[in-house]
Image (spheres, rainbow, N blue to C red):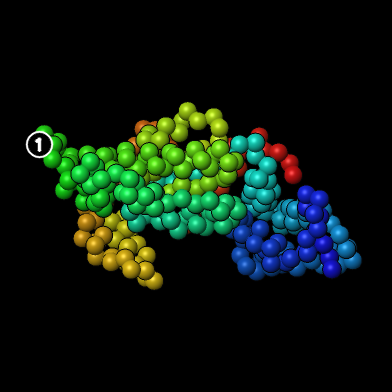
Amino acid sequence: MRCVIKEGKRYPFSKGILASSLEITGLSIDETYDIVKEVDKDLKDIDEIPSKEIKERVCGKLLDRGLTKEERFYRVTRKLRYLEKPLLLMIGGGAGVGKSTLSAELGHRLDITRIIGTDTVREIMRTMVSKELVPTLYESTFNTDKKVKAPFVKKRLIYGFDRQVSVVSTGVKAVIDRGVKEGLNSIVNGVHVVPGYLDMDNREDCFVFQYVLEVEDLEEHAKRFEMRAEGSHRDPDKYIDKMEKIRDIQEYIIQQGVENGAKVLTNKKMENTIRMIVEDIITELEPVIKDG
């Protein structure tokens, strides 16, 4: 059996695992298969090989095809586990812009298994904070204006949303602190990931990347709710009927992103959004990443 030596341990060589590691490049299935097949052929008479040498062979195959950007994606992202500090991706945006789907795909490609959605944190916070104390916590983000009693507040929806985000951010920060303490690469996503609320700019114990996703076209945004309702118990009409409010919150989050240094990305095609995020990450981390 052909074995791969990695960190002093032996593992069976797997064409499936090798193909999976190439997903970050965005290559087509046919291109990925061709490279895996060539590497497998090169290793035909080899019983043991260091994992580092396999990576070098893959990089060579990519460069031979003139795929310089794809080679860089593959080479640098394969080394994320050797960072001196954990990697933290913060992905915010209004409802229905694709945060959860994008986070899951990024986690898969970057081998990040710790993905936290702020809706889950909000549910936990509801068990800790009473409805009488923070009534906006118990409403959907686009209905928080119903619980605003302040008579002189003009933007009641944004005020209510701010109250909810402020409370949820306490729980989100605790989750982030725990992950950083344990040295875990993490992705935190949700409508409550609003730049400026979590004081990420002052953190020196992790590599932080903050993004805000948006969907510019109103009609396309509405269709997203119909698409994500498939295979779930979510009622798309519940959201589509509140599109004006959802768009108002989206604009507020974008504004906060611009003011607090987050990158605002139009999430029209997920593959393009992923490539922009990965390009941003490797450009920032390539100079400091360790070899492995």
Query: Which one is nearer the viewer's eye here, 69 or 151?
Result: 151
Does residue 24 sit above or below 153 in this rendering? below
The mark total stands at 1
Specify whether 190 is left or right of 274.
left
Does residue 68 sit above or below 176 in this rendering? below
Q: Secondary structure at mark 1?
A: loop
Locate residue 289, reporting x and y percent: 67, 38
Circle 1 residue: 151
The quarter in which the N terminus is drawn is bottom right
Q: Which residue is rendered at x = 34% and y = 57% of the image?
A: 96
Locate residue 213, reporting x and y percent: 40, 48
Residue furthest to the left in view is: 151
Residue furthest to the right in view is: 45
Locate residue 118, reporting x and y percent: 39, 49
Specify whether 152 is left or right of 284.
left
Query: Which one is nearer the viewer's eye here, 251 or 167?
Result: 167
Query: Which one is nearer the viewer's eye here, 42 or 14?
Result: 14
Regarding residue 260, the answer to whether it shows in the image is: yes
The quarter in which the C terminus is drawn is top right
Amino acid of disc 1: Pro
Q: Which residue is rendered at x = 34% and y = 37% of the image?
A: 256
Badge 1 density bin: few <14, some 14–19, many ≥20, Cα 10 Å: few
Q: Which residue is rendered at x = 58% and y = 56% of the image?
A: 109
Regarding residue 211, the answer to whether it shows in the image is: no
Specify whether 34 is left or right of 247.
right
Locate residue 233, reporting x and y percent: 33, 68
Q: Which residue is rendered at x = 17% and y = 46% of the image?
A: 147
**To which quarter of the image does residue 136 belong?**
top left
